[in-house]
Amino acid sequence: MADAEKVLVIGSNSFSGASFIDYLLRLDIPVIGCSRSPEAHRAFLPYRWSGRDAHFQFHQFDLNHDLDPLTDLINEARPHYVVNFAAQSMVGESWKNPDHWFMTNVVSAVRLHERLRACNFLAKYVHVTTPEVYGSTDGFIREDTPFNPSTPYAVSRAAGDMSLRTYFDAYKFPVVFTRAANVYGPGQQLYRIIPRTILYVMLGRKLQLHGGGLSKRSFIHMRDVSDATWRIAKSAPPGETYHISTNQIVTVRELVATIVTKLGAKFEDCVEIVGERLGKDAAYMLDSTKLRKNLGWQDRISLDQGLDECIAWVKSNFADLKRQPYDYQHKP
C-alpha cells in the first residue's frame, strides 16, 4: 500500500467524515482520522461496520487547542491528501455564540492552513465547505455565484473560503473546494431531519416542522458524496470548486411526509408546525454540471432507496439510538 495514497481526515467523528473514511477503507486506502471528541458511539461510525478498519488510526485533536500535536502527526505521517470536514456547522445555533463559530471556522482554520502550506508532501487539501455561503438561491446556481451569507455560520464559512482563495492565489496552495447539497445516510446524527423524523415516528413523539417545512432542498446520499469527494481529491485541478448535488428538489415537508408514510403512520399524528428559524434560507439548488462533465461523476442512490437504508439503520440500532441525545450538543 503506497504511502502516497495515505489520507488524513479532519473531523472524523462527523457524519460526513466517518462515512468518507468508510468509503476509503473499502478501497483499501489507509486513513488517519482526527476529531476533537473521543470516537462516537459505533452506531454513528460507518467505518466501524465493515470490518476493514485495521487500516484506520484515530487521534483526538481539537483544531482550537491541539494544533501543535496535529502538525506533528501530519509531518510524521506525510499524508498525500488532507480532507477537512471539521467545522462548527449548526446554522440556527450560530446566532447564540457566533464567536465560537468564527474561532473554529475562520481563526483556527487559517492557523491550520498556514501549517499545511509548509507541507511539501501534500498533493491536495480538500476543503469541505457549504452552499450556505450563497444564501438562498433562485434557481440552480453554478460555482461562480457570488457569496451572500445570511447567518453567522454562513459568514464564518465564507470567510474561511475566501482566506483559502488568497492562499491559492498567493502561494498556489493545492486547495480544492467541495459544496454538497443536504447529505444524509445511515449513521447520521439524530438532530438531522431524516434520522430525527424516523426516530420520532418510531417513538411516537411529535416532530417540530419549522416554518411548515416549505424550504426546498436537494438530499444526496453520503456514498455519492464520498465518491465525488475522492474524485475531486485525486483529479481536480487546485483552486477549483465543485458542487455535489442531485437534480431532485423536494420540500422538507414532502421529505417528512414520505418518511412518515414509509413507516405506516399519519402525517398529522407525527408533526407539529412551528415558527421558522432565524435566517433560514428558502432554497439551495446547486448545479453540479461541472463535476459530472469534468470528473465523470453521477449520483447513483435514489432518495427512495436512501430513505429505506436510513430506516433500516434506525430499526437495527433502535435500542442504542433511543438512549443517545436527540438534540445538538454544542461544544465551544
Image (cartoon, rainbow, N blue to C red):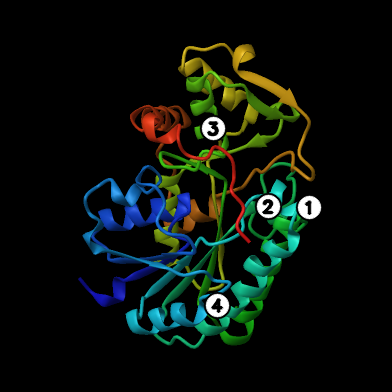
* Residue type of the residue flagged with mark 2: Glu
Q: Tell me the kind of residue under disc 1.
A: Ser
Q: Nearer the viewer, residue 321 or 103?
A: 321
Callout 1 environment at 10 Å: few (<14), some (14 to 19), or many (20+)?
some
Q: Which residue is under mark 1?
A: 150
Residue for badge 4: 112
Q: Return the residue at label 3.
A: 196
User: Closer to the N terminus: mark 1 or mark 4?
Assistant: 4
Provide the residue designation for mark 2.
132
Left/right placement of residue 151 relative to residue 244 reads right
Q: Dots 1 and 4: beta carbons under 8 Å?
A: no
Frontmost of labels 2 and 3 is: 3
Going from N to C along the chain, the mark reached first, 2 or 3, is: 2
The image quadrant where one finds the C terminus is bottom right
x, y (%) of residue 113?
A: 56, 78
Dot 4 crowding, Cα within 10 Å, few <14, some 14–19, many 20+ = some
Three-letter amino acid code of the residue under disc 4: Leu
